[in-house]
Amino acid sequence: WGVIATGLFSSATRLKLAFDQDEHIGWFYEFNRGSGNFTMLGAQLVGVAFIIIWISVTMIPFFMFLRVMGWFRIDQLEEEVGMDLSIHKGQAYSINTPDQDKVDELNKSKSNSNYKLRGTNDNNDIQNVEEGKEVSPPDQSRHSAISIGSREA
């Protein structure tokens, strides 16, 4: 919108200050002069078209590569359970807790992993399947809090 707005609302005064020329101004100001000069807006629209083409040419092959490799989206079950549980083995926030059945199903599908999700308990503990001992998340009280306007160490 900003690129197109420049072609619509560029005033002669501001163009004179910035570029020392006021020949081609915004379309609305051109109508005020009694002209329908489309030069500034046309140049801005060409710029928008070039940006769209450039992004399409560079990103479509990249996204196609991700899709072919299977890296574009996560598994449907992981999406339902949440990436915090499926990747990091614990919840960052307890806003929406997934169903325990979904967590168990995800555990079965990731049975080749070293860690097993324990579900949506209060501690978000991780159980190391190989060693049989529980590992808790790091103690957050050691980290310094950041607040605006004051310093805490």
Image (cartoon, rainbow, N blue to C red):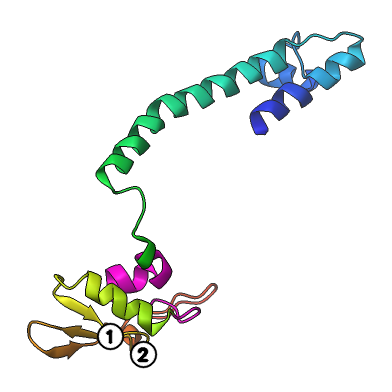
Question: Picture coordinates of residue 86 (x, y %)?
Answer: 30, 70
In the picture, residue 44 is in which quadrant? top right
Residue at position x 64%, y 14% from top?
A: 43
Residue 54 lies, in percent from the top left, at 46, 24
Instruction: Decide which of 25, 151 is in the foreground and name it.
Output: 25
Q: Where on the picture, by quarter, is residue 88?
A: bottom left
Quick check: can you spot residue 90? no
Q: Where is 75 relative to 46, above or below?
A: below
Which region shows up in magenta?
Answer: 78-97
Residue 65, position in %: x, y? Answer: 29, 37
Label 2 with label 1: CB-CB less than 8 Å: yes
Q: Measuring 33% from the left and 90% from the top, which residue is drawn there?
A: 123
| Tag 1 secondary structure | loop
Disc 2 to disc 1, how far (Cα)?
7 Å
Q: Residue at x 28, y 85 (%)?
A: 118
At a point 85% along the width and 19% down the height, the residue shown is: 29
Query: Dot 1: few (<14), some (14–19), or many (≥20) neighbours within 10 Å?
Result: some
Q: Is 42 one of the magenta-colored residues?
A: no
Foreground pick, 109 / 62? 109
As for residue 84 lying within the magenta part, the answer is yes
Furthest residue in direction left, as rendered: 131
Q: Amino acid at mark 2?
A: Asn
Q: Amino acid at mark 1?
A: Arg
At which x and y percent is residue 103?
A: 33, 78
Mark identifier at residue 118: 1
The one of 14 and 114 positioned closer to us in this rendering: 114
- Image quarter in which the N terminus is found: top right
Mark 2 Cα-neighbour bin, 10 Å: few <14, some 14–19, many ≥20: few
Which numbered circle lies on residue 23?
none
Task: Identify residue for label 2.
Answer: 121
